[in-house]
């Protein structure tokens, strides 16, 4: 699995096999018109960004469960 960030119009961190799959998830779950400014990021970067969000919500125990696994999904939207 790869991790992708979309920065516009709404930030999203998405776990997907391909950029195409990430864009499809974004259109389905975040904004029907799709996003722009995509970036492939490392798993370490995804862990850091997601961990900071979860820490703010006192839910750090879900970090590993959400980032591991074979299914594509939206990890966070801001």
Image (cartoon, rainbow, N blue to C red):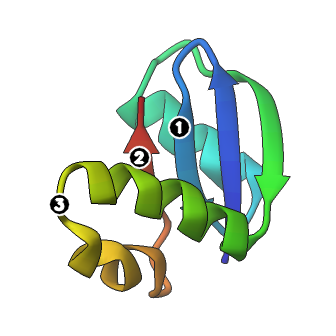
Above or below: residue 33 compared with residue 1: above
The residue indicated by pointer 2 is: 76
What secondary structure is found at the residue carrying circle 2? strand
Q: Is residue 12 above or below residue 59?
A: above
Which residue is tagged 1? 12
Quickly name the residue at label 3. 58
N-terminal of the pair, mark 1 or mark 3, is 1
**Relative to 66, residue 68 above or below:** below
- Asked if residue 64 is positioned above or below residue 4 in the image, the reply reads below
Residue 52 x/y as whole percent: 44, 55
Which residue is pictured at 75% across the width and 61% down the height? Answer: 18
- Which residue is located at x 45 percent, y 19 percent? 31
Q: Is residue 37 left or right of residue 73?
A: right
Viewer-nearest residue: 66 or 49: 49
Check disc 3 and report its element: helix, strand or loop.
Answer: loop
Q: Residue at x 38, y 50 (%)?
A: 53
Quadrant containing the N terminus in the rendered view: bottom right
Estimate how packed mark 2 is, as few (under 14), some (14 to 19) or many (20 or more) residues with alpha carbons within 10 Å: some
Which residue in the rendered view is the most extreme toward the left?
58
Question: Disc 1 and disc 3: Cα gap in Å?
Answer: 20 Å
Quick check: 75 left or right of 11? left
Q: Position of residue 10 (x, y in %)?
A: 52, 19
Q: Position of residue 66 (x, y in %)?
A: 36, 74
Which quarter of the figure has residue 35? Answer: top right
Q: Quadrant of residue 78?
A: top left
**Residue at point 69% right, 74% down?**
44
């Amino acid at each position: 699995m790869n991790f992708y960030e979309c920065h516009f119009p709404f930030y999203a961190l998405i776990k997907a096999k391909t950029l195409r799959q990430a864009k499809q998830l974004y259109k389905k779950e975040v904004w029907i018109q799709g996003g722009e400014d995509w970036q492939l990021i490392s798993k370490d970067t995804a862990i850091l960004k997601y961990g900071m969000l979860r820490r703010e919500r006192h839910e750090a125990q879900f970090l590993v469960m959400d980032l591991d696994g074979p299914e594509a999904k939206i990890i966070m939207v801001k």
